[in-house]
Amino acid sequence: MAKLIYHTAITLDNFIADSNGVADDSIFLNEGDHSTDFISDIQQYDAVLMGGKTYEYGFQFGLKPGEPSPYKLKHYIFSNTMQFESNDKVKLIKHNAVSFVQDLKMKEDGKLWLCGGGKLAGSLIEHQLIDQLVLKINPVIIGTGIPLFGNVKLRLNLDLVDMKQYSNGVLKSTYNIIYS
């Protein structure tokens, strides 16, 4: 059974992007030791899962619909509105993300990386499908934006399994989620 890990950058006030969906270096620190560790960290994953808006964010850097991002992993894109043909590198899932991820976790082994999409993360955590959080907490408060779990509000118990502090103020916290 695969393990689903929500590995993402957040602000100190738990936003993954600003209200306009911007998650660039105006909010997040992209330079420093944590960036090198991030590149190393993503090598552990067997596939990447992301919401449509997270995937579309790459379009401003030249990514085209149906193309994989620079991460050399199998991509699963969750969107009801996007239109492109799935291929062997990028699969578009248009309906019932929860059922798809349940099946994917049962069929696969290894680690699946949920890299973004607060709404997607919210629906997956509501159904207890996220196993671990890896949060790159940036030393910034933006006041409003896209929350870590979208509009989902729930209480979770977490077990801190790793913590690393970087010289630029970024903290990387790794938590196992304890569902009761």
Image (cartoon, grey):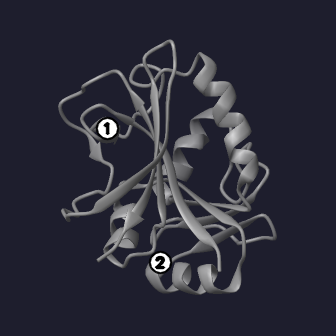
Q: Residue at x 30, y 40 (%)?
A: 15
Q: Amino acid at mark 2?
A: Ala
- Image location of residue 180, percent across then percent down: 29, 77
Quarter of the picture holding the N terminus = bottom right
- Image location of residue 132, percent across then percent down: 48, 59
Q: How many marks?
A: 2
Q: What residue did someone put label 2 on?
A: 97
Q: Residue at x 40, y 34 (%)?
A: 22
Q: Amino acid at mark 1?
A: Asn
Q: Is residue 106 visible?
A: yes
Q: Which mark is residue 151?
A: none
140 horizontally vs 111: left or right: left
- Based on the displayed image, in which of its 4 quarters is residue 146 positioned? top left
State the CA–CA distance, disc 1 to disc 2: 24 Å
- Image location of residue 178, percent across then percent down: 36, 68
Q: What residue did someone put label 1 on?
A: 20
- Based on the displayed image, in which of its 4 quarters is residue 93 positioned? bottom right
